[in-house]
Amino acid sequence: MKKRLLAPLIALPALALVLSGCSTSPGSADSSSDSTAPLSIVASTSVYGSIASEIVGDHGTVTSLISSVAQDPHSYEATAQDTLAVSKADVVIKNGGGYDDFMNTILDANKGTAPKVVDAAEASGLLPGHEAHNHDHDADTAKVDDSSKEAGKDHDVHNHVEGFNEHVWYSFEGVKNVAHDLAHVLGDARPAEAEAFHKNYEKFVGQLDELTKSAEALKPELEGKNAAITEPVPMYLLDSVGLNNVTPSEYSEAVEEGTDVSPAVMQATLKAVGAGDVLLLAYNDQTSGPETEQVRKAAEAAGVKVVDFTETLPDKKDYVSWMQDNINNLAKVVGK
């Protein structure tokens, strides 16, 4: 994707964040050959870092290359430290689907021991051509690349799929599938801990099911109501509560791609937002610019509730608590 305009936030150092596990440095070298060493997992963003932490538990370290809402995964450029972390990783988890292409660049250039790569877009079952999972604990259904070289070879096939919303972490069923594959990969790397990874996965699935129930509880108030968006980031969640997106697709696509919104498309978007039948505006607070701020002001002037969303975890949040906050924010729109 083309580089997008970030909100005017202070740039943060691109330091990896160790989310869980032992307090060793990221990417413990040769841990795959040492059954007692903690597994080293590198995630493209804190979203997948949090998910990985839930599954690996105390049996590994997790490093998130992007850990701040001040960073845009679409336009992020990897650092030397990122490359080093990946070169020492046992497992890498990326979003794929054209979202975090910097991971492909790192994997293509990796000259170290090739890590196992979990591609969330493919694992989610949401990408066209990739069927849903069998969640049988004994079924070897994990969709992983056997090496960074293989991961890099085919990554262009699934980049920028027309009509595909690559923000798969806003789908609880999709995340369940990703966690399933990750548990299998970790179990293959550490057979002695496979049962622990499976138990962690089952516990995480229970939390995802609670999130699903929370979202479904809003359907009586939200189903069939109109919503507008600045980008398709939270659309899986909005779809799950029954909201109808009335935003011209040309607007949200241009904002996501970082291209100019034409005057005609902007006018159509402002008209839709101010038509009087839009309940809320889902606003990507992590990346913004004049064209999104104009729509936000129009929504506020029309009495439309604005609900902020981000692409990575806010400070002091894990995946589950963050998603519960997003659901709670939707509930506030209808006074729940």
Image (spheres, helix red, strand yellow):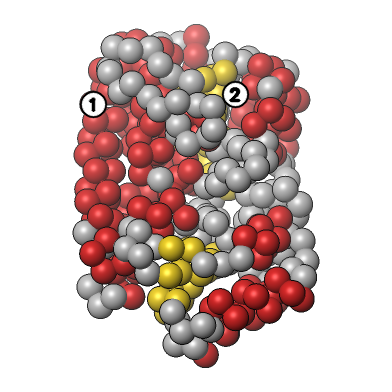
From this viewpoint, is residue 28 visible? Answer: no
Name the residue: 29% across, 75% down: 334
Q: Nearer the viewer, residue 36 or 207?
A: 207
Q: Decide if residue 162 is on the left or right side of residue 137.
A: right
- Residue 124, image quadrant: top left
The residue beneath circle 1 is 199
Q: Earlier in the sequence, mark 2 or mark 1?
A: 2
Label 1 residue SS: helix
The residue beneath circle 2 is 88
Mark sitting on residue 53: none
Name the residue: 28% across, 37% down: 204
Disc 1 crowd, CA 10 A, few/some/many (<14, 14-19, 20+): few
Name the residue: 24% across, 43% down: 209
Label 2 residue SS: loop
Q: CA distance from mark 2 to mark 1?
A: 26 Å
| Residue 32 pos. (x, y %) | 49, 14
From this viewpoint, is residue 66 visible? Answer: yes
Q: Say above or below: 295 vs 173.
A: below
| Residue 213 pos. (x, y %) | 22, 51
